[in-house]
Image: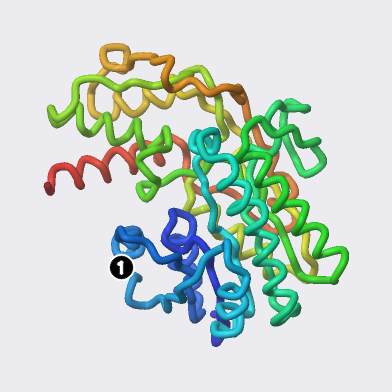
């Protein structure tokens, strides 16, 4: 067990931040969360995992370099995980400048804070398969050219290349995880997997009558977030920094996901799913399929949770939540 290490996580109250905090606490880390001041309670995920009281919160914002510098200093972080982001692709079309500042320049600010305070600290950047966008290869790996199709993908690409640049310019142990879609019961309701799971539970309990979706033929490589945060940690345990695709290597369509989710509660998706133009994106990414061979070979990482298990887990969690209300 790793002892006495300190980690700083931006975006700790998000899905990945919560699971990563849980993982690191289990390995004996002191975990610090970088948290912007918000009027609403964003800590429900940490509370649901039962770890809220074990995390040390540091107030600050990804748009403010001085607060990032204070966070890296105050936490004495051996490892810094930059998971903070405006992480919903759909919102990036309505808020492109905010997305660019938080996801692109924000990553650069975290790198700069680490460089200034302690360039020996190891850095992880949360990159994304959305950077591949208009795919240039049937299966995307670390050598596949990027072609982002949303303001989110463009902003994340800046953060990704900033990480490569600081690694090469300053010799920093800075790695990027190019994570394909990863979901869980802690996913935000605006993401399609959680939207489906929540709707299925609501329909089963008689609280909702239909589910409106955009392009249900879009295909994604979906995995369980709890598996993926382990890959993040493994990257920072390597002798040298590098970039890794983290994926399952399998695709599932939104239509097939709906079929699985509704079938889990004994219903047929055709009776409830309605396609709505309102949810179509200006530029769609039709298929994303990752090749995680490098992560398997160098990190020894492989996903443990099947897509069927993931969807069942998410639907059951929403059934519990809605029933308890």
Q: Nearer the viewer, residue 97 or 268?
A: 97
Left-right relation of 111 to 150: right
Q: Quadrant of residue 3?
A: bottom right
Left-right relation of 31 to 150: left
**Residue 97 location in percent, x, y?**
59, 44
Q: Is residue 64 visible?
A: yes
**Residue 224 location in percent, x, y?**
48, 46
297 to 250, vertically: above or below? below
Which residue is disc 1 drawn over? 50
Q: Nearer the viewer, residue 185 or 125?
A: 125
Residue at left offset 62%, top offset 54%: 126
**Residue 167 location in percent, x, y?**
81, 64
Q: Quadrant of residue 38?
A: bottom left
Q: Is residue 2 visible?
A: no
Residue at left offset 65%, top offset 66%: 110
Residue at left offset 43%, top offset 15%: 277
Left-right relation of 26 to 108: left
311 to 254, vertically: above or below? below
**Residue 221 location in percent, x, y?**
57, 34
Kindly state the secondary structure of the residue where label 1 is placed.
Answer: loop
Q: Nearer the viewer, residue 272 or 311?
A: 272
């Amino acid at each position: 067990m790793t002892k006495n290490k300190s980690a700083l996580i931006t975006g700790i109250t998000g899905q990945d931040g919560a699971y990563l905090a849980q993982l690191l606490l289990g390995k004996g880390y002191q975990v610090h969360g970088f948290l912007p001041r918000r009027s609403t309670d964003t800590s429900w995920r940490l509370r649901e995992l039962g770890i809220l009281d074990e995390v040390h919160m540091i107030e600050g914002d990804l748009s403010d370099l001085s607060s990032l510098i204070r966070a890296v200093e105050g936490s004495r972080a051996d490892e810094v995980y930059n998971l903070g982001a405006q992480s919903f692709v759909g919102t990036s079309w309505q808020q492109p400048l905010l997305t660019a500042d938080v996801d692109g320049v924000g990553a650069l600010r975290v790198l700069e804070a680490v460089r200034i305070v302690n360039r020996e600290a190891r850095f992880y950047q949360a990159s994304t398969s959305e950077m591949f966008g208009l795919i240039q290869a049937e299966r995307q790996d670390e050598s596949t050219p990027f072609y982002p199709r949303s303001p989110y993908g463009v902003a994340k690409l800046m953060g990704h290349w900033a990480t490569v640049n600081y690694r090469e310019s300053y010799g920093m142990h800075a790695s990027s995880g190019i994570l394909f879609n990863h979901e869980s019961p802690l996913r935000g309701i605006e993401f399609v997997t959680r939207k489906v799971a929540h709707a299925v539970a609501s329909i089963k309990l008689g609280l909702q009558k239909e589910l409106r979706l955009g392009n249900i033929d879009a295909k994604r490589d979906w995995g369980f977030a709890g598996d993926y945060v382990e890959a993040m940690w493994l990257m920072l345990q390597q002798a040298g920094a590098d970039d890794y695709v983290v994926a399952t290597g399998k695709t599932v369509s939104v239509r097939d996901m709906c079929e699985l989710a509704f079938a889990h509660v004994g219903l047929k998706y055709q009776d409830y799913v309605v396609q709505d133009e309102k949810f179509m994106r200006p530029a769609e990414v039709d298929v994303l399929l990752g090749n995680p061979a490098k992560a398997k070979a160098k990190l020894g990482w492989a996903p443990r949770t099947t897509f069927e298990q993931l969807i069942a887990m998410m639907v059951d969690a929403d059934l519990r939540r809605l029933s308890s209300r």
